[in-house]
Amino acid sequence: MRIRTKKDVEKLDNKIKEELGIDVRKYRNEEVSENLVELLVFPKYVISWVIRPILISIVVFIIGFFVFDLVHIEYVIYGIIGLILFLMVGIITGLLFLMWKMKSDIWSIINYSFEIMKSAVTDLNQVNKENRKDVLGLLFKGIIHVVTIPMISKIISDKVPFVGGIVNRIVKNILTLVTDKVEFDEEKLKQEHNKAESESNVLKEYSNSISSASSGLEKIMNFTFGVAQFPLKIVFGIILLALILFLYLIN
């Protein structure tokens, strides 16, 4: 079941209530989500993770005028080429830090959703055994689309001026993609449920499956962001090498 519109979210919410007997809205926690959104305030992101490395690069560039033994035309050469290379190093460093920070904070939101799931599975006593194999996928979609996204969206709209809509859309698209990609071992769950001697064993299997899915998704996120950062790392290495060679030649 793919979720794309508000109607899809309503259908998902009703399906969870009917099939699982759970109202996932009760797991909303405005205070926790507000703390999570504090991580995603876009202006702070830019200042802390992009602007700062650029400023440091400029400071190092200026110090170079006093450290290197420059004469006549060398001042001009260093002033033009050095500034360009230092700025490029600063910008790319800032972008790499920004991507790392975004991955870390988005994972905090996803991990929060998994923690809600672990609390929610204790309310699954009413679910018939034949439906249990489909529970986790349905429950995770419900928590993301009915709990996490609405809370995060509301607070982003309130706290992030001007670009709140853009940040909101990015976070929503990432979380939606996550719900489409995450996989639970439904067949293994079904087998374990058939063998389970008590309800506590069933809940333990749910918790183990959630932890396993969380670990798998974290690896996928690390790989995805690693691939996205790879071209920047290559460019950074080339520019840094060019900067070191330039400084060596001009000194």
Image: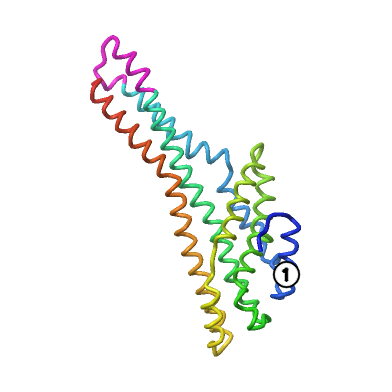
Q: Measuring 56% from the left and 58% from the top, which residue is drawn there? A: 178
Q: Is residue 250 left or right of residue 33?
A: left
Q: Provide the secondary structure element on which disc 1 rests.
A: helix
Which residue is at a point 62% across and 78% down the rendered structure image?
A: 132
In the image: residue 14, left or right of residue 217: right
Q: Quadrant of the N terminus?
A: bottom right
Of residues 54 and 144, the one nearer the viewer is 144
- Residue placed under numbered mark 1 in the picture: 15
Magenta region, mostly helix, strand or loop? helix
Extreme residue toward the bottom, this view: 197
- What residue range appears in magenta? 65-83
Q: Residue at x 64, y 58 (%)?
A: 148
- From this view, report whether residue 163 is shown above or below residue 33: above
| Quarter of the rendering occupied by the C terminus | top left
Q: Position of residue 212 (x, y in %)?
A: 48, 69
Q: Position of residue 28 (x, y in %)?
A: 67, 62
Q: Quadrant of residue 161?
A: top right
From the viewer's perspective, tell me whether residue 7 is left or right of residue 151.
right
Residue at the image point whose x is 72% and y is 65% from the top = 13
Taking the image as shown, residue 238 lies to the left or right of residue 19, namely left
Q: Position of residue 186 (x, y in %)?
A: 55, 74
- Is 147 or 132 nearer to us in this picture? 132
Find residue 24 and report its horizontal and vertical position in percent.
69, 67
Q: Amino acid at mark 1?
A: Lys
Q: Is residue 131 magenta?
A: no
Residue 78 painted magenta: yes
Mark 1 neighbour density, 10 Å: few (under 14) some (14–19) many (20 or more): some
